Image (cartoon, helix red, strand yellow):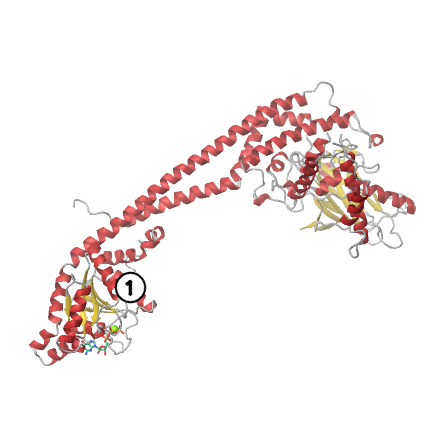
Amino acid sequence: MSVNIFPGKDVQDFLRVIANLDGAGGNERAKAIVHRIMSDLFKTIEDFDMTPDEVWVGINYLNKLGSENEAALLAAGLGLEHYVDMRLDAEDAALGITGGTPRTIEGPLYVAGAPEQKGKARLDKNPDADAGPLRIHGTVTGPDGAPVADALMEVWHSDSKGFYSHFDPTGRQSEFNLRGAIRTGADGRYEVLTRMPASYGCPPSGATQTLLNALNRHGNRPAHVHFFVTTDAFRKLTTQFNIEGDPLVWDDFAFATREGLIPPVVERTDGHGVGFEEATYRDIEFNIELTPKVAGKDNQIVERARAAA
Amino acid sequence: MPNSLASSPADAPDIDAASFAGVLRVLPHRAQDLARLAMLRGGGAPVVTVIGKYNHGKSRLLNELMRRDAFAVADRRETVCLSECLHAGVRWLDAPGLDADVAGADDRHASTALWVHADVRLFVHSVKEGELDAAELALIEALRTDAVRTCRKALLVLSQADQAGEGAALDRVVSAIAAQVPDMPRHLVSATRHRQGMEAAKALLVARSGIPALEAALSDALACVGQARAHETELLAGEMRAELEAIALGQATALKALRQREADQRRAFEAELSALLETIGGEMAAVVDAPGPDLALVADSAGTRYATTAAKQERARVQVAYSRACIRIDALLAGHGVSGLPRAQETAAASLNTVMVAVMGVSVKFRADLRRLFCTALGRARLHADFAYYFDLSKDRLRLRGEIAAAAAAREAAIEARMALPAPETGA
Ligand SMILES: Nc1nc2c(ncn2[C@@H]2O[C@H](COP(=O)(O)OP(=O)(O)OP(=O)(O)O)[C@@H](O)[C@H]2O)c(=O)[nH]1
Ligand SMILES: [Fe+2]
Ligand SMILES: [Mg+2]
C-alpha cells in the first residue's frame, strides 16, 4: 500500500534529529551530508514504495559487501570513482589547466615499495605461458614539452589470469611480479619489458557482480596498465592505459577508459634486440605529459589506504 | 648423621624404564606400576622397607634387624629421603616418616619406597602413641588390599614396646589396636631391649624384645618374594597388556569410522560437483551457442561511452550467465565448507580470498573461454580436479585428516607399547 509521509512535518523533523542538525557539536559538514543522504534514501523508499524486506536485503547486502571487502569495487562499478574524476576534470577546466596526460582511477591493487631502477626495468619474474611479451616505453615531459629527469614511474598490471602479485590467491606470483618503479634519466625516457596483462573483472560470485547481475551488467575491465608518475616539480599523475584492441576498451565496468589512454599496440620482431627471449612482441609507446601544480600545490593528491610490501 | 653404609637410590629405577617409556606415554596413569614393573624386571635382592609416622622408631628398627647402625636415628623428624643398605641378601630401605598433615616430598619418597621398591613392608607404629589414627588405618587398609592383589606381604610392627608402661597400660593399647585391625598379626617389639639384650648377651631380653619373632615372620615373608614377584609381574603386565589391547582396538574402530567418513564426504562432494558441472555445462552451451556473430568481441567507441550498445548487452549477457554459474558452484562449495581460501593462500584483498576466485581467476570470460571451461568433458574434469584440490585443503577435511592421523598414531603406540611389556607366561 502506497503512502505519502515524506513531506510531512514528522519525517522532516525526524531527519533533522537523525543528523543532529539542530544540536550542538559534531562536524557540521558531516551532519549536513548525512542529512542529505538519509533524506534522499527516505524519499527513494517512499517513491518506490519499498517493502521492509527490500530495505533489509539492502542492509544485509552492505554486510556482505563489507565482509568481502568489495566496497571499493562497487564504488568503481557504480561509477562513483569515475564521477569524482569527472569533477576533477571539470575543476581543471575551470582553472584553465589543459593538456597533460589524462588522469584516471587508481584502483585498489597498488603496492608501495617496488625496487627502483634507472631508466629501464624488466617486470616479469614468473613465467606465464598465456601472456606474450610486451614492451612499454616513452618520454616524460613537462607542459612545455621538455623531458623530465628523475620522474618516478610506478607501473603495475595483472597476469594472464587477471591477478596482481601480492593479491594472487593461487600463490603463483612472487613479490613485485609485474610491478616496477623506474626513475627517468636526463632524457626523460623510461622503458619496461613485461608480459601482456589480461582483461579482468570482479570476482564472479562476489558481492559486486551479484548486484551487477540484478542490473544485467558485467563487472569487467579491459586489459590495462596502471601508472603513478611522481616528480618534485609537477602534479602527481595517477593513470592507466588500456590495451588497444581489447573489446572492452569502451565498455569498462569502472568507466576508467579515456581518450588519450589507448595508445596503439604495434607488433615488432626485434625482440632479441630489446632484451626479450622471443623475437615477436607487442610494443606500446606511452608518453607522459605532466601538469603544473596549482599555486605551488598538488591539488590532486588522494589519500587512501594502500598496501605496502 | 648420615651413615656411610646408607646410600640413596633413585626414586624410580632406570632399569628398563626406557623400554617402558612408550607404555608410559599411552598409559600415563600407570606410571607407578611401570616403575614397579621395571624394578621387578631388574630382579635383584628382595627389598624390605619401613613405613609409618615419623619418630615411631623405623630407622632404629631397621638397624636392629641388620645388626648395624646403618641409618640415622634421632628423637625428631630425621629421615627425609630414601636410604638403603644391602645386608644379608636383602635391600633394606629406610623411608621418611609419614605426616598426615604434610603431603610433601618426604611423603612422596615414602610412597615410592612403599609401592615401587618394596617386596615386604614393615608398617611401624609406636605403642607410645596409643591407637592407630585414621591415616594409619587407611594406609594399612591400602597395604592389605595390595597384598591380596600383588602377594606382597605387609607386617604390622608395634614399636617402642618399652615406652608404653608395663602390664595393663601396654595391654590396653595392644588390644585396642588388635580391635582396630583384628585379622592382622601384630609384632610387638622394643629396639632398646633388643640392643641391651644383644650387648649383654641376655637371651631372655632378646627374646622379650620381640625382634626374633619379627625376624621369623620376616624370613617367612622373604621366602615368598620370588613367587610374589613372578605373580606381580604377570599381574601388572597382564593388566596393562589388556588395557593397551583395548586402546588399540578402540582406536582401530575409531580409525575405520573416520576413514569411512573421509571417503563418504569425498564421494558426496564429488558426486554433487559432477552433477552440478554437468547441469551448468548444458545451460552454458545454450548461452555460448546463441545464433549470430559474437558481438561481445566487437569493440565500442568513445562516442558510445555513456550509451547502451548491442555489444555491451551481449558482454553483460555472457558475464551474468557466467556469474550465476559461479554463484551456484560457490553455494555447493560453501555447503561442504570449501568456499574460503586456505589460510596460507590468503591475500591482502579479502574479495580474492575465495576458492572460486583461485580456481576461475578473474580474467574476462568470452564465449570461447566458457565453452572450453564448462562445455567440454576435459574442461569440466579440470574444474572438478581444481575444486577437489581445495576440498582436500578445507578446514574440515584437514581436521578430519588430523583425527585420522592421531587415531592411527594412538593405535600404533598402543601396539608398540604392548610389545614392550613382558610377554604373558606360556604353558601355565
Ligand atoms: N625407648 C625406645 N626408644 C626408641 C625405640 N625405637 C626408637 N626409639 C627412639 O625413638 C626416636 C625415633 O627413632 P627413629 O628410629 O629415628 O624414628 P623414625 O621413625 O625413623 O623417625 P623419622 O626418620 O623421623 O621418620 C629415637 O630417639 C630413637 O632412639 C625403642 O624401641 N625404645
Ligand atoms: Fe587494475
Ligand atoms: Mg628414620
Q: Position of residue B18 (x, y in %)?
A: 32, 56
Residue, far left: B203
The one of B43 and B73 positioned closer to us in this rendering: B73
Residue, far front: A9
The one of B194 and B401 positioned closer to us in this rendering: B194
Q: Residue at x 82, y 48 (%)?
A: A188
Q: Position of residue B413 (x, y in %)?
A: 35, 47
Residue, far top: B291
Q: Position of residue B60 (x, y in %)?
A: 20, 74
| Residue B25 left/right relative to A112 | left
Residue, far bottom: B200
| Residue B170 left/right relative to B385 | left
**Count of labels shown?**
1
Q: Residue at x 31, y 47 (%)?
A: B244
Residue underneath mark 1: B111
In the picture shown, does residue B285 fall above or below A301?
A: above
The one of B81 and B163 positioned closer to us in this rendering: B163
Q: Is residue B11 visible?
A: yes
Amino acid of disc 1 = Ser
- Looking at the rendering, in which quadrant would you find the N terminus of chain A? top right
Q: State which image quarter holds ligand 1.
A: bottom left
Kindly state the secondary structure of the residue where label 1 is placed.
helix
Q: Quadrant of residue B104?
A: bottom left
Q: Is residue B189 visible?
A: no
| Residue B137 left/right relative to B224 | right
Q: Quadrant of residue A63?
A: top right
The one of A231 and B2 positioned closer to us in this rendering: B2
